[in-house]
Image (cartoon, rainbow, N blue to C red):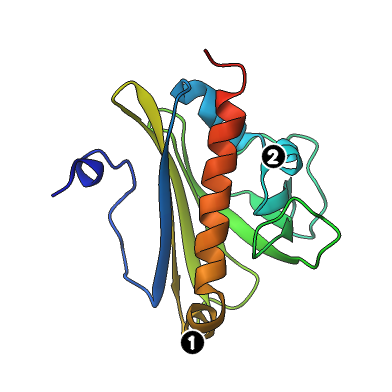
Amino acid sequence: MSAAALSSNLPPLVSEGVVAISDSIDIDAPRERVWEILLDFPAYGEWNPFIRSQTIVDASKCPLADQTVLEGQWLYMGTVHIPPTMDDTVSSSSTMELITHVDHDAYRVAWVYKSLPRWLLNAERWQTLSEVNGKTRYETREVFGGPVAYILKFFMQQGLRDAFRAMAEALKARAEEGQS
């Protein structure tokens, strides 16, 4: 087993699904700083080329005044770019998610896809932070299942991989700004 696998903060897979997309990157910044950036959804438009707009909302997509990330809240990703880009004039998609896990002590957050019925497409995304060799390791994984996941795998798998990589690199750049 590799050192990276031993140091993972991602939970074990519940299901292999049809396709799983993952990425990780080591960041030269304190874990608390990276966690703060990761959970600051209103600021995603400043740095994230994958998910340009992410807002905690009620079930009717109305933004909540308090954007504190809590389990059981709805998450509206209003501008999602696949492939990733900082150019908001290009076409984008949107999605509704339900936050299922927030663990500030273990630095783990997860949500599940809710825009289509679960039997058509189910997806669960985890993002975690670990301390590894004096740096912060960001890890993310999303597992897709259901019939629509086969279409996603065929048409969007590489775009999703590129988007996960772009987000990891942008998170690293944002967290390392001003670090010496």
Would you identify the image quadrant in which residue 141 lies?
A: bottom left
Would you identify the image quadrant in which residue 3 lies?
A: top left
- Where is 76 relative to 33, above or below? below
Q: Residue farthest to the left?
A: 1
The reply to whether residue 160 is in sight is yes
Q: Amino acid at mark 2?
A: Trp
**Residue at image point 78% right, 42% down:** 64
Residue 79: give x, y in percent of width and height. Answer: 75, 58
Q: Do the residues bearing badges 1 and 2 touch, measured as CB atoms within 8 Å?
A: no
Q: Is residue 34 left or right of residue 8?
A: right
Q: Nearer the viewer, mark 1 or mark 2?
A: 2
Residue 75: give x, y in percent of width and height. Answer: 66, 52
Q: Amino acid at mark 1?
A: Pro
Q: Residue farthest to the top?
A: 180
**Residue at image point 65% right, 54% down:** 50
Total marks in image: 2
Q: Is residue 29 left or right of residue 6?
A: right
Q: Is residue 99 left or right of residue 56?
A: left
Numbered mark located on residue 95 in the image: none
Q: Depth check: 77 or 136 in front? A: 136
Q: Earlier in the sequence, mark 1 or mark 2?
A: 2
Label 2, secondary structure: give it. Answer: helix
Q: Which residue is mark 2?
A: 47
What's the distance in space between the residues labelled 1 and 2, CA to CA? Answer: 33 Å
- Where is 114 relative to 154, above or below? above
Label 1, secondary structure: give it. Answer: helix
Residue 13: give x, y in percent of width and height. Answer: 30, 60
- Where is 61 relative to 6, above or below? below
The reply to whether residue 71 is in sight is no
Q: Depth check: 74 or 144 in front? A: 144
**Residue at image point 55% right, 16% down:** 179
Q: Which residue is mark 1?
A: 147
